[in-house]
Image: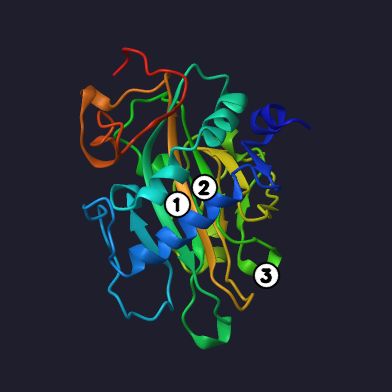
Amino acid sequence: MNPRDAYSAYGFTIHSDPLLPPEIVKGAFKGMDDLLKRDYDRGHLPEKPGWNPGDKIDALVKIEQPQIASKSVLDLVGHPAIGEAAAEVTDADWIQVFWVQMLIKPSRQPANGVRVNVGWHQDRNYWQIWEEGSELLTAWVALSDVEEDCGPMRFVPGSHQWGLLEGSDFRGQDIDAVRDGLRLPADARWEESPALMQAGGLSLHSCYTLHGSGPNTSGRPRRSFAIHLRTQNSNPVNNQREGVTRYIDDETICPVIYGTRSSSR
């Protein structure tokens, strides 16, 4: 099935082979390490550094808006291959980045007591600043190979058609309990598809698609960026610039990565 049909039918599509050039991935990998050292070559702090040099990586590292601080991360975030892939599945006239998260999931055995799961959730639950009907999606870009033992992101096919559900919990460590707490439609069929890919590969998912992930037991960190995107069919509520919309007028932070931004808000 081609990416556009898969996205329409399942709410996600996975590019398992690299879409991004090796030099872009390598540069962003180094940029990620520099961010952990608080070495900011753009001269600005990320939105929430969330990290202190020397800290042990034993829980999920999540740094907001890392492209504000790193040139090489911005090069990855703004790469046209991501925009082209997103435009292919949405038939968009233009695509803009509106928020980015840098993610490092450490390798830990569940018996160690500290889990680094990501609970089942729909992104739309956290993006109420956008008007109803706004077309929002996420490109999840791998900087390291993601295999089954890496705690890959898992999607629930077709869940983008279930509407906005109660019970989303990104931080929920007991992912089975989070699943049991979701209020699903009576005819919902629960299946899970892992997003397995090579470094430089990516997945795309709708803001209504349920997703989460279990523990990484691979022996190596799982490195990625979640790049949140909007099409021309999106507007902030009351044209507000706050929360995840507060940088959308600054294309040095939130680049347009496909087409040319129109006059829509």
Q: CA distance from mark 3 to mark 2?
A: 29 Å
The residue at the far front in this view is 23
Q: Position of residue 194 (x, y in %)?
A: 68, 54
- 171 to the left or right of 218: left
Q: Secondary structure at mark 2?
A: loop
User: What is the three-letter code of the residue carrying label 3?
Assistant: Asp
Marking on residue 167 = 1
* In the displayed structure image, the side of residue 265 where residue 142 appears, left or right: right
SS under mark 3:
helix
Above or below, 265 against 23 in this view is above
Foreground disc of the pair 1, 3: 3
- Residue at 39%, 52% (x, y): give it: 101
Dot in front, 1 or 2: 1
Q: Is residue 234 left or right of residue 186?
A: left
Query: Which residue in the structure is indicated by mark 2?
Result: 183
Badges 3 and 2: C-beta atoms under 8 Å apart?
no
Identify which amino acid the numbered label 1 is placed on: Gly
Residue at 57%, 35% (x, y): give it. 81
Residue 80 point in image, percent of width and height? 52, 32
Give percent across and percent down for residue 243: 24, 41
Q: Is residue 80 above or below residue 259?
A: below
